[in-house]
Amino acid sequence: MSEVVIENLTKKFGKTVVLDHVDLKIDAKEYFVLLGPSGSGKTTLLRLIAGLEDVTDGSIYIGEKKVNDLLPKERNIAMVFQNYALYPHLNVFDNIALPLRVRGWSKDKIRHKVRDVSERLHILSLLEKRPKQISGGEQQRAALARALVRDPTVFLLDEPLSNLDAKLRVEARAFLKKLQKELGITTIFVTHDQAEATTMATKVAVLNRGTITQVDDPYELYIRPNDVFTAGFIGSPAMNLVRGTAKRVGAEWEFFNEDLKLGLGNLKLDAERGVSMGIRPEHIRLARDGEGLGCTVSNVEPLGSITYVTVNVGKTSLVIQLFGKSDLETGSSTRIEFDKDGILLFGDDDGKRLDVTGT
C-alpha cells in the first residue's frame, strides 16, 4: 500500500486561489479525513490527488512516484463520488464489473472478482438488480464494490454518506471503518460533517479557505485546537468562544469582559492582551447557591442521557452540558462555574491558541 505526500500544493481557478501552499503526509494504510465547510477546498484537493484537476503549483506523490502529470487511470486510485455514479441501465453486477472490462479481463476472472468483492460487502443477492431497485445504502455498497474490484493502492471517498438517512449513516460509518481496517487500503475521506471525521479517522486535516489549520488525531483536535476556527468547527455543540481581555491581577491572571470576570491562575503571558476564551460545554457546570456566576436560561435541549442548556451572563451566551434530565426552564435563573483546566485562550491578533501553561 502507498503513502500520499503533498508538497506546497496550490490550485487556482482563474485568479481565485482554492488551495494555498498545502503540505500533507498521509501514511500507508491510514484512514485520513479531509474536513472543512463548503468552499474550504477539500473536494478540490481530493480531485487533484485523483488527477481529475490539474495542479497549478506544487507536487503530489503516491508512493515514491510523482503523479502530477499522470492520467487518473495511471495512478491506481479508486474514487467513490457523493452521488455514487451508478449506471441506471446496468445491473449491479455490470456496474461493478465495468472497470475490469475496460482493463480487458476475461469473463471468468471478472465473475470471480465481482462475486468476491460483493460477498465482502454483503451485496451478493443484489447483483442482478438495477440501481433504482435497491436502497441508498445498497447503492453505496455497490459503488464501493466497483471501486474495490480494481485493487487500488489509494481509496478516495467524496462525501459518500451524505445521501443516506441518519440511521444508515451511523451504520455506514461503522461498516467503512471496519472495511478499511480489514483491507488495509490507504483511504482519504472528504466530509463537512465533523462527527463523521472524528468517529472514523485515524487522522484529520481541517481545511479553511484553502489552507490547513491543523492535522491531528480526532481527540487532539477536540481538546487542543490550534486556532479559533478549528475550536469552533470541531465539536457539537461548538466550543464556547468569548472575546475579552487577559490581564494580570496581583500574582495571577484573569479574563474579563463587560459580563464576565474569571480567574485563570498563573499563566505564561508577557503582557495584557485581547483574547478569545474557549471552553467546551462539558467544562461548565451548575454552581451552588451563592457561588459562581449568576445567569439566565435562554434555551434547554434535552437529548436523553444529556441536556444542553444555553445561558446568558449579561450579553454573553454560553452552552453548558448537563447529565440526564434538567429541571431548568427557559427564563429561569441559575448559577454556573468553570473548570479552569478546560479553558483555552486564543490571541485576538491571529486567532492562534496561546501556550499559557503555568510554571
Image (cartoon, rainbow, N blue to C red):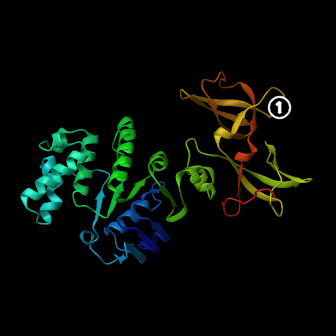
**Residue sitting at 38 percent across and 35 percent down?**
167
User: Which residue is denoted by mark 1 in the rendering?
Assistant: 291
Counting from the top left corner in percent of width and height, residue 150 is at 22, 61
**Residue sitting at 80 percent across and 54 percent down?**
246
Residue 211 position (above or below residue 338): below
Counting from the top left corner in percent of width and height, residue 336 is at 75, 34
Q: Residues within 10 Å of mark 1 (few under 14, many from 20)?
A: few
Counting from the top left corner in percent of width and height, residue 335 is at 76, 30
Q: Quadrant of residue 163?
A: top left
Question: On the picture, is 271 further left or further right than 142?
Answer: right
Can residue 291 be spotted in the picture?
yes
Q: Quadrant of residue 67?
A: bottom left
Query: Looking at the image, which is closer to me, 221 or 179?
Result: 179
Residue reaching furthest to the left: 107
Question: On the picture, is 17 further left or further right than 308?
Answer: left
For the image, the number of numbered tags is: 1
SS at badge 1: loop
Residue 132 position (above or below residue 100): above
Q: Quadrant of the C terminus?
A: bottom right
Query: Looking at the image, which is closer to me, 99 or 88?
Result: 99
**Residue sitting at 40 percent across and 74 percent down?**
60
Counting from the top left corner in percent of width and height, residue 348 is at 71, 59
**Residue sitting at 24 percent across and 45 percent down?**
139
Residue 168 position (above or below residue 203): above
Q: Quadrant of the N terminus?
A: bottom left
Q: Amino acid at mark 1?
A: Glu
Residue reaching furthest to the top: 327
Can residue 159 be spotted in the picture?
no
